[in-house]
Image (spheres, coloured by chain):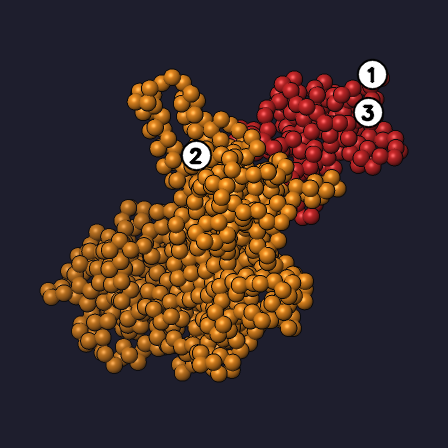
Amino acid sequence: MSDLRDMFFEECDDLLEVLSTGLEDLQNETSDAETINAMFRSVHSIKGGAGAFGLDRLIKFAHAFENVLDDLRSDKIGVDATITALMFSGFDHLSDLVDAARDDNDLPDTDGAAVLAELKQTTQNANGGVGGDDDDDANEVSSDDFEVQAMDFSFDLGGDDDGGIGELPGLPALGGGEEAVDGATHFVVKFKADPVLYTRGHDPALLFRALGEMGELSIEADRSEVAPLESLKDAPAAISWTLTLRPDDGIDESTIREIFEFVEGQCTLHISETVLEAAAGEEAAPAADAPAAPVAEAAPAAATAAPAAKAETKPAPAKAPKAEKQEAKSGDGGKKSSEPRNSTIRVDLNRVDRLINLVGELVISEAMLRQSMNELPVSANSAVSEAIGQLKTLSGVLQESVMAIRAQPVRGLFQRMSRIVRESSRQAGKTSRLVMVGEATEVDKTVTERLVEPLTHMIRNSVDHGLEKAEDRVAAGKPEMGTIKLEAAHRSGRVVISLTDDGAGVNRAKVRQKAEEKGLIRPEDDLTDSDIDNLLFRPGFSTADEISQLSGRGVGMDVVRSEIQALGGRINLQSEPGKGTTITISLPLTLAVMEGMLIEVAGESLVVPTVALRETLQPGQANIHDFCDGDRGLSVNDSMLPIVDLGEALGFRAPLPDFSNQSLLLIEGESGRRSALAVDGIVEQREVVIKGLEQNYQSIPGIAAATILGNGKIALIVDTDQMIPSPGNGNPGLRKGSELAEVNSNV
Amino acid sequence: MSEQATQEQTDERIEIVSFAIGEQAFCLDIGHVLEIRGWTNTTTLPHAPDYVVGMMNLRGAVLPVIDLSMRLGLGKTIPESRHVIIIAHIDEKSVGFLVDAVSNIITVNTDEIKPTPEVSSSRTAAFIRGVYTLDDTIVRAIDVHQIMPQEALSAA
């Protein structure tokens, strides 16, 4: 049972994502009939599943939500800003309810009550003009609705939409009801199979299909006699069907009877002829709210044939365009929720991770093998080296493919953020919208998961500090509604996620003043604009004059930065006064492999990530200039870069007297600052498998991670950003060896 | 009734791995020990405490090796091939302990442990949980949680 339950909640996540995508479309006015249908299906499936697990609050809420969606798709309500906003709050609350149910928590009763009431009100207003409808609604919220809907859910698995078993696949012209309102003659066939029909192997679907070949057919199933799930035995025998046929030429009652000839005596069959008036159809439409109330509507259908036919006119317009859509989609191979789902499987993440680890080790073993082969006296074009070359290619491809399993589009992450934008805007009393670009960009699952917190915080900051108040925005000639743009893209082997707001930008004077007050910088420090902007990432920095509800709770941008860094990412902030702020996060594509330059320092092998590397040089002593305290600079292209002696910075040896025998690596950090790393020798460029140090040990200043070389030895990967001195930046990796020794001996 | 009595007795009996550092005997609960390996070369860590020898490669996993002698204040070990690394799993982390030799696996009763003598060294008090007396030998039980490198270092 708990497996099923887990599966339900996993499915809920997918369904909520569909719902959320639909809401975005609705808001951006890019929605069509299928959008609302898909949303309806999502909520409906959640409700169905919730029914199976007895999650009453979820059922109730989903039901109210579903009704509004249903009114939307039957055009009883038009899409406007109020409805969209209501749906968004509905979505938020629905997600909360799902989460609460998942964790077995109880949300306070007051939570979402307003939304629920509003949803109900909307449905009532939409249907208010018609007397009978209120009753329908009342019935639907009551408990007997639950049974019917639970059935619906199980039928959904094989079928399609709300039509359930009534809509049989492969039947032509399902939506024929549109033309039904034209005064033509119709046959109404009432069909109810006796149990014996089924035991003899007949299938009503085949009969209906044969009937469908005679003209335009619409089918309505009456499930009112179907027993509740727990006492269910012969389900099919309890269902009766009302089939309305608009016959082609030359079809009369006797031809229709022929179809049912074989099952004579095994069913109840009633065929009648009727003429549908256009006016009559219209009049009846609002009264018989077909899709929302199948049971209620089935009753009159059973009474006389004609009203049943009228009822058919209602859902038809909604269905017809959908049927077309589906055709169009299967034509161009589109993949929406209506397509079969068997193209994906759910796999336990642990299994994937195990596979990835194994492949990582395979790559290492392969490298070890290759290295030992190189040491053997084997000629380069022997069969062995050819096979080894092939092995290398294969293991590389294998690793790439395995890593791709973990890659996921950032869409889900972004959609979570849209909720954060809504909530924080509401709390801050601002109006803003989220624009998403590049949601299809794929990122490692771990990365997307661990980006939730930092992104949430960044967005709150953007809404709270970035965007101006409405009146200020209007005064500045901007639209009242603020725009926050979340963008993802792959750029040169990394994933770049940027958050842009069109707010006031960083108030640099204020930031500088604050930083001076807090002693983070000295008044005489000469800082560029970008240096000042990036002061925001310093620990303990907050410029908000008053602590607001949203941010300023002690968690600063420094936490965001350290979380990004823990993912091997870099964060950078750019701001233009009056125009807005952009925070850019650049992340490695995978957490497992990267390109690096293997170097040697003081007898140790180390790896410098290639991303940061700009140039390698063997300087003449002439280019190196001495400064105070052994500091040295390198003149390159008319600029002076600080030289960092890697061996000294990492505490491997005493400072070198001169760098004439050293190789220099020009590195550039995320902030654009550069420095030159002095190393003993450069070995080669290679791909390395990243092994975290935190897992078994702890983070080490100046070191990002470790890797295993071909000979089985471990090489440390240098954290280049910490090797770039900067006045506004504390660099633990650059503390002199002696200071660190003191720290260590205290432990 | 007798069953319950047996149950209680087995509950108190644990297995310990005893090992030598210099002339002294120490032990750990066998539950922490994953495997025992010969000495392999390690990669020096920058800015590491003096008792962290370096990182070793254990079939693709990177884990730190701690010189237990140095950690316990008994002097630095110059590792040679005769030395042994005990791979242990403690607080969700894998770690290697560099020791002179592994002596034995012994079954003891948990109530046989005697408190550490109240000596002045804070290191003794922190790292030694107590002692077992076995055949005239004093075996010092290591407090594995305390012996791990402390995270405070990187925050400093």
The residue shown at (36%, 50%) is A341
C-beta proximity under 8 Å, tags 1 and 2: no
Q: Nearer the viewer, residue B17 or A305?
A: B17
Q: Residues within 10 Å of mark 3 (few under 14, many from 20)?
A: many
The residue shown at (68%, 23%) is B78
Instruction: Say yes or no: labels 3 and 2 on the same chain.
Output: no
Report the Cα–Cα distance between label 3 and label 2.
Answer: 54 Å
Task: Tell me the amino acid under the disc marked 3.
Answer: Tyr
Task: Tell me the amino acid under the disc marked 2.
Answer: Glu
The residue mark sitting in front, 3 or 2, is: 2
Chain A visual colour:
orange
Check residue A684 in the rendering and tell me which mark sits there, or answer none: 2
Chain ID of residue with mark 1: B
Check residue B132 in the rendering and tell me which mark sits there, or answer none: 3
Q: Is residue A544 left or right of residue B113?
A: left
Residue B94, horizontal then vertical, whole percent = 62, 34
Task: Tell me the amino acid under the disc marked 1.
Answer: Asp
Residue B44, horizontal then vertical, whole percent = 61, 33
Q: Which residue is mark 1?
A: B135
The residue mark sitting in front, 1 or 2, is: 2
Find numbered disc 2 in the image and state the secondary structure of the residue it sits on: strand
* Residue A540 appears in view: yes
Q: Nearer the viewer, residue A132 or A346?
A: A346
Chain ID of residue with mark 2: A
Report the Cα–Cα distance between label 1 and label 2.
Answer: 57 Å
* Residue A52 appears in view: no
Chain B visual colour:
red
Quadrant of the frame with the C terminus of chain A: top right
Report the Cα–Cα distance between label 3 and label 1.
Answer: 10 Å
